[in-house]
Image: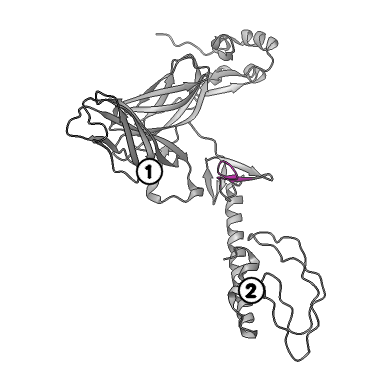
Amino acid sequence: MPITQASFDNIKVGYISETDGYVQNVSLSAANTYAELNPDTEFIFIDGDEKVRFLTINEVNALTPKNLLRSDPCLTGDQPCGPPKLKFFGGGGVGASANPVVDVSGNLIAVDLVSGGFGYTLPPQVQVIDPCNNGSGAVLQTIIDNGVVVQVIIRDSGQGYLPPAQTVPQYPAILELTGVTVTNPGFNHNCGVDKIEIVPSNGSVLSYNCDPFGKIRSVSVDKGGRFTELPQIRMNTETGLNATFVPNFDIIRDPQPIEPVITDVVQVYDLVGLNINGYVDGKPYYGNVYYVNGIRYAGTTARSGTNIVVYDTQLASVQKRQIEGQITASQRQETETQEDTIESISSPSRGSYSTTPTSAPSTPSTSTPSTTPATGGGYSTPSTPATPSTPAPSTPSTPSGGGGGGGYGGGY
C-alpha cells in the first residue's frame, strides 16, 4: 500500500456550529470562507499526536503538513509497558480527554476527566487501550450535558492493568466516594432488613431503596470515605440474589494543600498532559486556584480554600518557603527573649499580656514606630502606642504587656 505524502490538502479542521453541531473535515479554503462570515470562530484541529488544538483562523493558516506528523515518529526497540490510555470516539463531538486511575491490584477504578470536549449529541464511547495487552475487561460509560462530557462511570473495572511507574508523568490525587451505580438490581431482597456493605468501608456509610419485588433501585452515599483500591459493595442478605454495584469517585486533583494522610493519596498517570497551575513548596501544583487581591491561592474559593500561595515558578516557591522559615525562626527567638525579659521584671500572668508595646525601663523612646507591615512571616509592626509618662530614674516602669506572643500573630 503506497504511503500518502502529507500536504496542505490533507490539513482538515472542524468547528462547532449552533445549527449543525460539530462540523468536521473542513479544508483550509473552506475554513477561511466560514471565518469571513463568522470572524470569532474557534477551529478544532487534531495533530499528528492525536491532541486536540483550538485555533483562530490565523493559527489555522499557519498550519503546515508537519503538524500532521507525530512529534516522535521513530520509536525503536522495546517500549516500557504502562497504564492504559483512554480514547473517546463517536457521539458527534470532539475534545473529551481523561486520565485513568489504576489501583495496585490492576483495577481501573476511576477516571479523572480533564476536558469534557464540545458538541456531543450522544454520549461518546471510551476505548481503554492497553499498549501491552496486560489488562482487559474495563467498561466505561459517559454522561453528557449540553454537548459536554461531565462524567465517566466505571461499569466494570476490568483487571490486569498496570499502575503508573515512577518514570512516567503523574500527579497525586484523592478519591472520595460520592456515588454508587447499580449495575444489576437483583431480586427478592428483603427491603429494610438486608444490609448493604462496603468492604473496606474507610468510614463510608451507604443506604438503599428497592421496589416491591426486592430489586435494588438506587444506593445513596450517606457518608463518603477515601479510597486507594477498589472496594467491594454487596448486599448482606439471606433471600436476595444477583445485585451488583460499582463505586463512583470524585477526584481531588493534587491534594497537597489539604494535607491528606499519605495513605489516602493515589498517583494518576498523566497521559493527557495537564497544565501546571503553579508551584507549591517547590512542587508542581495541578489543582484549582482562586485569587484574592491579585494573589493566587490553592483551592476553589476564599471561603472553602486555603491560605497557601501558588507561585509562578518553582524557584520562587522554594525561596519564599525558605524566607518564611527564616523569619519564623528569628521571630520565635525574639519573642522568647522578650518573654524572658518581661518575666524577670515583673513576672505577670502570661495570659494577661496585651498587644501594646512595652515602655523602656529608663528613658522611653520618643520616636513613632512604623506602621508599615513587615514583609514575610505573617506579622506586622504594632500600632503606634500613646506617649508614655517618664518613669522615675531609679525605678523601672511597670510593663504594660511587653508585646509577647499575642503581638506577633502566629509567629510560632
Cα–Cα gap, marks 2 and 1: 44 Å
Residue positioned 69% across, 80% down in the render:
399
Q: Which x, y percent locates residue 283?
A: 52, 48
The quarter of the displayed image where residue 155 is located: top left
Q: Residue furthest bottom?
A: 394
Can residue 406 be spotted in the picture?
yes
**Disc 2 crowd, CA 10 A, few/some/many (<14, 14-19, 20+):** some
Q: Which x, y percent locates residue 252?
A: 46, 40
Is disc 1 placed on a helix, strand or loop?
loop
The numbered disc on residue 353 is: 2
Find out whether residue 58 is within the magenta segment: no
Vertical arrangement, residue 175 with respect to residue 119, above or below: below
Is disc 2 placed on a helix, strand or loop?
loop
Q: Which x, y percent locates residue 28?
A: 61, 11
The image quadrant where one finds the N terminus is top left
Between 305 and 117, the residue placed more toward the observer is 305
The quarter of the displayed image where residue 132 is located: top left
Which numbered disc flags the more N-terminal residue, 2 or 1? 1
Q: Which residues are magenta?
A: 296-305
Vertical arrangement, residue 32 with respect to residue 107, above or below: above
Q: Which x, y percent locates residue 228?
A: 35, 42
What amino acid does circle 1 point to? Answer: Gly
Judged by its main secondary structure, the magenta piece is: loop
